């Protein structure tokens, strides 16, 4: 990064298990710094260490422990990228508000996975799908954008299959999950 300045980011749904994983992965990240956390009204107004029952291995990161959790209705100041760990039912109405306000929303929810103008991204495999963002902004009138990830099973299968496909041409797969 230029001048070693990290990009300030927010995590929506920060107190849930997926939100905790975002916080954990973004802590000490070379490009990003978590500067804003948001969650439900029952967590809003509390320091993250009080609002969050940490469920992951290791300790709650000290870098975020003091951050006061905000309501998801309050758009964070000073960030452009928002990592959303909201449940799909909430993401469906909240994420477009952020995208319309100019935020880059990286969603883990299933709410927009089947929209024809929302890229479902596995960066190592289909980063070229980000070209859809131009169409998305035009169609929806957003200043920001929304991208989503596939479900965990798809990612786990696609990552090793891509090099196999590139080398040998995979034509058919039969997969069973017990989710």
Image (cartoon, rainbow, N blue to C red):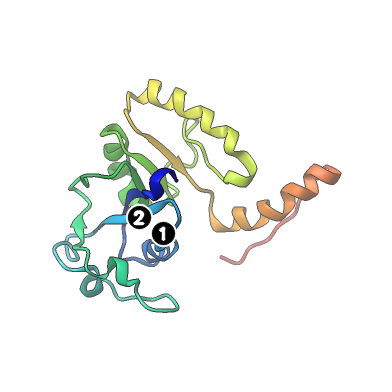
Q: Residue at x 28, y 40 (%)?
A: 98
Q: Residue at x 31, y 67 (%)?
A: 63
Q: Residue 171 has which mark?
A: none
Judging depth in this view, the residue of 66 and 90 nearest the camera is 66
Q: Residues within 10 Å of mark 1 (few under 14, many from 20)?
A: some
Give the image location of residue 136, x and y in percent.
42, 27
The single residue placed furthest to the top in the displayed view is 138
SS of the residue under disc 2: strand
Quarter of the image with the C terminus in it: bottom right
112 up-or-down from 22: above or below? above
The mark total stands at 2
Q: Earlier in the sequence, mark 2 or mark 1?
A: 1
Give the image location of residue 102, x and y in percent.
29, 33
Q: Report the Cα–Cα distance between label 2 and label 1.
A: 7 Å
Write down the residue under mark 2: 33
Residue 171 visible to an observer of this rendering: no
The single residue placed furthest to the left in the displayed view is 45
Judging depth in this view, the residue of 119 and 4 nearest the camera is 4
Give the image location of residue 157, x and y in percent.
67, 56
Judging depth in this view, the residue of 114 and 166 nearest the camera is 166
Q: Residues within 10 Å of mark 2 (few under 14, many from 20)?
A: many
141 up-or-down from 31: above or below? above
Give the image location of residue 149, x and y in percent.
50, 48
103 up-or-down from 164: above or below? above
69 left or right, relative to 110: left
Q: Residue at x 71, y 57 (%)?
A: 175
Q: Residue at x 39, y 52 (%)?
A: 32
Instruction: Give the quadrant of residue 111.
Output: top left
Instruction: Give the quadrant of residue 134.
Output: top left
Write down the residue under mark 1: 26
The single residue placed furthest to the front in the displayed view is 3
């Amino acid at each position: 990064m230029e001048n070693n300045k990290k990009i300030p980011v927010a995590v929506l749904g920060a107190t849930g298990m997926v939100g905790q994983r975002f916080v954990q992965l973004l802590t000490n990240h070379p490009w990003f710094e978590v500067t804003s956390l948001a969650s439900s009204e029952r967590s809003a107004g509390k320091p993250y260490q009080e609002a969050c029952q940490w469920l992951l291995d290791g300790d709650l990161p000290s870098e975020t422990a003091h951050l006061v959790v905000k309501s998801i209705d309050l758009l964070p100041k000073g960030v452009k990228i928002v990592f959303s760990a909201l449940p799909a039912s909430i993401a469906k109405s909240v994420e477009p508000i952020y995208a319309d306000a100019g935020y880059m929303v990286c969603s883990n929810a299933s709410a927009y996975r089947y929209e024809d103008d929302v890229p479902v991204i596995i960066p190592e495999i289909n980063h070229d799908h980000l070209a859809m963002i131009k169409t998305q902004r035009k169609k929806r009138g957003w200043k920001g954008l929304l991208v989503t990830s596939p479900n965990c099973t798809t990612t786990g299968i696609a990552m090793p299959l891509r090099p196999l496909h590139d080398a040998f041409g995979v034509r058919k797969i039969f997969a069973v999950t017990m989710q």
